[in-house]
Amino acid sequence: MAEKKTWPKMQKMKAEGEKIAMLTAYDYASASMAEKAGVDIILVGDSVGNVVQGQDNTLPVTVDEMIYHTKAVKRGAPNTCIITDMPFGSYEVSIEEGVRNAIRILKETGCDGVKLEGGAERAALIKALTEASVPVMAHIGMTPQKIAQMGNFAVQGKSAEDAQKLLDAAKTLEAAGAVQVLMECVPTPLATMITDALEVPTIGIGAGNGCTGQVLVWYDMAGMYDKFCPKFVKKYAEAGKLITEAMAEYVSEVKSGAFPDEAHSFAMKNAEEILPRLY
């Protein structure tokens, strides 16, 4: 059994040049597979809204739903570092509400920390969470919870002004207490520069190989979700196609009567004597 990665241990991984592998998971089975595969961090992402619930975006996901899924993931991967997304609406109203929801998530799930989206405007909240002993992963760059405001998903930090804002935000959030900084859809040179500028590890998704670690949605990397595939996703399998073919074969055998066969059924001794007596 591999040793569980803690935030201090992953800080040491950055110092020693060891990469961090992070994947999403939303249930017992996927979490169990991720732990067996040696994943360092499992993110119980609000992307559950897209790939599990079939929503168009992550906005409808609730705190109760995140707690439900995190509990299942914790049971499947008890020895992996688990972080839970704080969903839209759970921390924007006030710092007090954000701290209250984050503490509830930790207490009810046993996860190792929370992730929340936003730039320098989240510094006060991250500071308050850190003081409340809640580890926080900051999320900058393209932030899906702002889709209603942004209008679409696009690479962030391409201009000098925007790049400076991202660099400043990363430094500010680190100073506020963030244990790691996730960067989404950020040009590789800028993400690498930010990684070098921070003491804490960075996690990239569409941010190039200069980050300390990487994260992908497991439904994407395993070919389980065909509604949309971002440019930064590498499909390591076509599990969705394989499962669909297996389901189609099952349907065909049920229709033809080939399943269940004798090997998948239960026999009854003396059936020819017993059954005629029943009425």
Image (tube, rainbow, N blue to C red):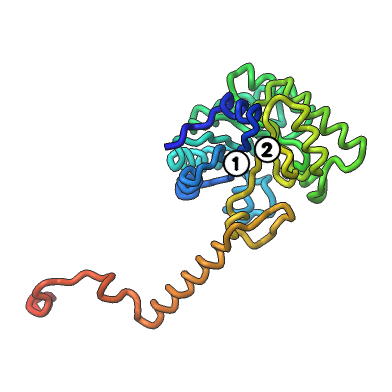
Above or below 106: residue 35: below
* Residue that sits furthest to the front in the current view: 16
* Residue that sits furthest to the bottom in the current view: 256
Label pair 1/2, CB-CB below 8 angstroms = yes
Amino acid type at circle 1 is Met
Query: Residue under circle 2?
Result: 203
The picture quadrant where one finds residue 199 is top right
Q: Position of residue 23 (x, y in %)?
A: 58, 44
Q: Residue at x 64, y 44 (%)?
A: 215
Q: Which mark is residue 22?
A: 1
Q: Residues within 10 Å of mark 2 (few under 14, many from 20)?
A: many
Amino acid type at circle 2 is Ile
Above or below 63: residue 32: below
The picture quadrant where one finds residue 163 is top right
Determine the secondary structure under disc 2. strand
205 to the left or right of 190:
left
- Mark 1 → mark 2, Cα distance in angstroms: 8 Å
Determine the secondary structure under disc 1. strand
Above or below 73: residue 262: below
Q: Residue at x 54, y 46 (%)?
A: 25
Q: Which mark is residue 178?
A: none
Q: How many tags in the picture?
A: 2
Q: Quick one: quadrant of the N terminus?
A: top left
Residue 101 visible within the image: no
Of the pair 61 and 127, the residue shown nearer to us: 127
Of the pair 157 and 201, the residue shown nearer to us: 201
111 to the left or right of 271:
right
Q: Position of residue 152 (x, y in %)?
A: 80, 51
Of the pair 165 and 191, the residue shown nearer to us: 191
249 to the left or right of 61:
left
Pick whichever of labels 1 and 2 is earlier in the sequence.
1
Q: Residue at x 63, y 24 (%)?
A: 99
